Amino acid sequence: MKKLMVLFLVFIMIFTLAACGEKSEGGSQAQGSALAEASNAPSGEEEKGKAGLSLDDVAGTYSMNTYYDGKEQQHTVVFTKSGDKLVASSDAKGEEPFELSYDPASGTASYVQKIPHENSAITIDSKYTFILEDGSTKVNGETTILFKDETKDGPRYEGYKID
């Protein structure tokens, strides 16, 4: 039962973290076409490498792939600026935007969600790193799930800015 509940909550978390969409049958091909369509290096700036992207550099629309449990899903995520934070919204129906803290020095956005469950809580910790790679803004993300002192790897994300 515990395993079933964790799997159920993982799927909820996937939707919450903007990870739903139709399964891509050629994820790398779709990702490649997104790269071909996009020339989105930050204007007026040199390539910065792995750190130092501003919120303005990061904000935009991303073609994202989510990898979990041997499956891949493709979706679109829009990151917008809200003060010194990022707000992520997905093309998934019924999804509410969620706010992430952002550290421009490291290019890392983070999101922690606690879901009450019986006498405990499930903690979902997601981190996204934005880098400039070959003139395109790329995001990599990973999620860990903590439940009753057990930590498990959650979905992994990879995407490219397309606008």
Image (cartoon, rainbow, N blue to C red):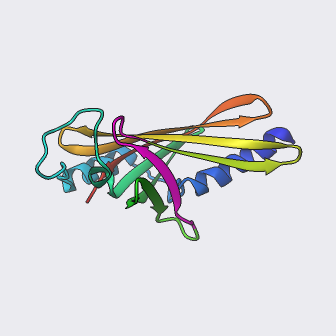
On the rendered structure, is 38 left or right of 122? left
Q: Return the x and y of residue 5 as percentages of the image width and height.
A: 80, 46
**Which one is nearer the viewer's eye here, 94 or 131?**
131
Query: On screen, 81 above or below 145?
Result: below
Q: Return the x and y of residue 151 as percentages of the image width and height.
A: 69, 29
Query: On screen, 163 above or below 117?
Result: below
Which residue sits at x=28%, y=38%? 52
How many dots with numbers?
A: 0
- Residue at the extreme bottom of the image, as rendered: 94
Give yes or no for residue 97 being in the magenta stretch.
yes
Q: In which quarter of the image is the C terminus?
A: bottom left
Q: Return the x and y of residue 116 as percentages of the image width and height.
A: 79, 50
**Which one is nearer the viewer's eye here, 163 or 114?**
114
Q: Quadrant of the N terminus?
A: top right
- Residue at the extreme front of the image, as rendered: 83
**Which one is nearer the viewer's eye here, 1 or 131?**
131
Give yes or no for residue 161 being in the magenta stretch.
no
Magenta residues span 95-108
Which residue sits at x=36%, y=34%? 106
Which residue sits at x=60%, y=57%? 15
Q: Return the x and y of residue 123 as percentages of the image width and height.
A: 69, 41
On the rendered structure, is 123 left or right of 129? right
